Structures are given as C-alpha cells and as structure tokens.
Amino acid sequence: MNIHEYQAKEILRAHGVPVPPGEVATTPEEAERIAAEFGGMVVVKAQVHAGGRGKAGGVKLADDAADARDKAGAILGLEIKGLTVEKVLITPAEDIASEAYLGIVMDRGSQSDVIMVSSEGGIDIEEVAATNPDAIQKLAVDARYGLLPHQASGLAFGLYDEPKLARQAARIISQLYEAYRAAGCTLAEINPLITTPAGEVKAIDAKMNIDDNALFRLPDVEAMRDEASENVYERKAREAGLSYIPLDGDVGCCVNGAGLAMATMDLVKYYGGEPANFLDIGGSSNPEKVVTAFEIIMSDPAVKSILFNIFGGITRCDDVANGIVEATRRVDVGLPIAIRLTGTNEDLAVEILKENGFEAMTDMDEVVKRAVELAAGPAG
C-alpha cells in the first residue's frame, strides 16, 4: 500500500523526526487560508501516488497566500502518470544549505532491511546508483539486534563531517528505522534530508510503501489508504482477492499461483514477447474471479493477446473454463485468446471451451508461444 507524503510525515513526526509543519488542501481557497496562517513563502506539493511530481509541475513555490491559491489551482486537477491530483500539501519553504538522501528498503537478497545514505540528495537515487554508486553508503541491519547506535553514527558521518550535523542525522536515521518497522514498511525515504544555514537537519520530503501483509495488525496505517488515488483496476483486483501488477508489455496473463505466474512471464520473455501484467487468480474455484480478471486485463489498451495458463489443483479447470465463457459473453473481447488448462476436471473444461468455440492446449511452452505470436499479429 502506498501512502501520501503528508501521511508519511505524520508517521515520522510521531517518531520524533524533525519535519516542518504542513496542512492538506483540496481547494485553492483552502490553500490560501493555510498559507496565510504560515506566512511568508510556502511550497505547494501535489499529493499523488506517483514519482516525478516536480518534473510534472506538481511542486511549486509560492511567494504569499494569494500566490499559493493560484499555484494550488494550477496543480489541483493536474494528471501525473495517469493519476489526478485531488490534494495538495502546503508547507513553509525552507532555507536549504545542503541536501542528502536517506532511505530504508527491504532487500530480499540479503534478507534484511538495508539503510542507504548519500550526500547527493534531492535527485533520483536510481540515477545516483547508476552514475556514481560509490556515493551511496549501505548498511544491512541484523534483525536480531536492530539498528545499533554506533551503526547510525557511522552512516551519519558518511553524510556530514561536522559533529553537530552528524549527531542530528544519526538520531534521524534511528528514528526513521523505528518508524519503518512500526508502520510495516517495505520502503521509507527522506529525500531530501536537508541542513539549514542555522545548522539544523530536517526531513522536508517523505515516502513510504507499506507491506499489505502487515495491515491486519496496523488498523491506523490501513486507515491511511486513499482509494481515490489508486489505480482503479489494482483496487478492483484487491477487492476480488486477485494479485495484480500492471507491466509494460502486450501479452495479458491470467494464471493461478504466483510461482506459475512468474514462470509464465519468464516464458513470454523467452519466446520474444513482453508480459502486460502479473495476475494471479489464486487457488479458489470461483468463475466470478475469472470474469473480473478478464475485465482487468481488458482495461489495458496495450494488451494484444490474452494468455490463460491454469494448472488445476485446488482451482478447478471447469470453473476457469466457465469463467472464460461467461466473461466473453459479458464483454466484447475483440482480442485473440490462448488457453492452457491442465489438472482437476481438465477433460470437462476442454469440452466446455470446445462447445463455446475455444481451443484449449495442455503444453505450457506451446500456449505461451501461441500467445506471443498472437500479440505480434500476422506475419508480414
């Protein structure tokens, strides 16, 4: 689950991180009122679950309250990476002496939380990693002991030579780690972490991604979910009990089981295609799930063929077949479909599909090759 910057800052404040004040506005008039209360220059920041807000015109500096109203009016309603801005954060402008990056991410490779710091903050950390990887200092935290004080200090002195700044940064690093763990994060970033001419270290931006699997024990964090800012089909998939991640390809994939889904996407790549999504319908026998999966795949205009790869264990092949038939009755698909069904009630599923004009395969390689060929279109 993604949360907005202002929500991430609330969590950081609760753990003692020095974060400038800020309030959210949904109208230009609200933005003007909030800016007037702060006085002086303010920053108007789009609150949307997308990166690159500044480059897209979603972050603007305002000279006064009237200017904040105008800037908010320009940002509200703006579309950034397919998402419409419905809220802006109004926060006082800071006098910045330097910028740094501080982040924590769950690293499956090392099976640990990894803290990353870089004195090159305020820009995409991916760009720094690609062009100057030595500028990023990393520490894998041992889950048995957590982040130890001397480790936080070591990272902090990697950012600042001046002891006064390093001590503040060490405290913020420890506080960010506490917030990361308490909120069930898979990612937490402060970019930039700034110093002021007066010698203060502050977090003026924040980003957090929350592990969905942790939400059952974190009702206060789950209440931060902003469904209006989510991809409508990702939300629809979650509500239907499906696992869906949109990708950039043109072969729409519908598979049961995460392992089979990953193997299917690997084969699509192997045979020269590009998967359009990860979509796992799970292990239950529910034709309605297949109908929903069809609707989600069809929502992507880039999809040129649809691939069903079902191994029937708990999932019954005849239920999937009935779902395919029902979906094509409800929706004018208009796309070629490649189907592989094998396992529980396989023979019945094949009969159901044949009676409704579909062909079902049993070989995984063959069906994937067929789906890639269908997406590529007629030869020549």
Image (cartoon, rainbow, N blue to C red):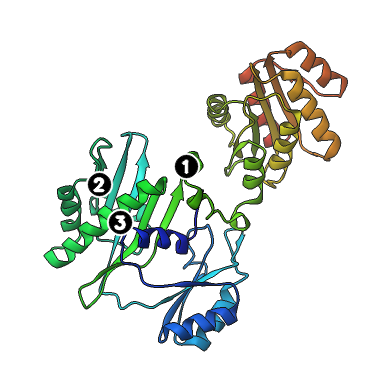
Q: Which residue is mark 1?
A: 217
Residue 254 sits in quarter: top right
Residue neighbourhood size for the residue with mark 2, other residues' Cα within 10 Å, grouped as few (<14), some (14–19), many (≥20): some
The percent position of residue 349, horizontal first and vertical second, equals 77, 17
The percent position of residue 149, horizontal first and vertical second, equals 17, 50
Q: Amino acid at mark 3?
A: Leu
Q: Secondary structure at mark 2?
A: strand
Residue shown at 69% from the left, 42% from the top: 296
Mark 1 vs mark 2: in front: 1
Residue shown at 63% from the left, 36% from the top: 242
Q: Amino acid at mark 1?
A: Arg
Q: CA distance from mark 1 to mark 3?
A: 27 Å
Against 269, is 42 above or below? Answer: below
Task: Tally the marks.
Answer: 3
Residue shown at 22% from the left, 78% from the top: 197
Q: Are marks 3 and 2 in contact (CB under 8 Å)?
A: no
Q: Secondary structure at mark 1?
A: helix
Question: Which comes before the other along the chain, label 1 or label 3?
Answer: 3
Q: Which residue is mark 3?
A: 102
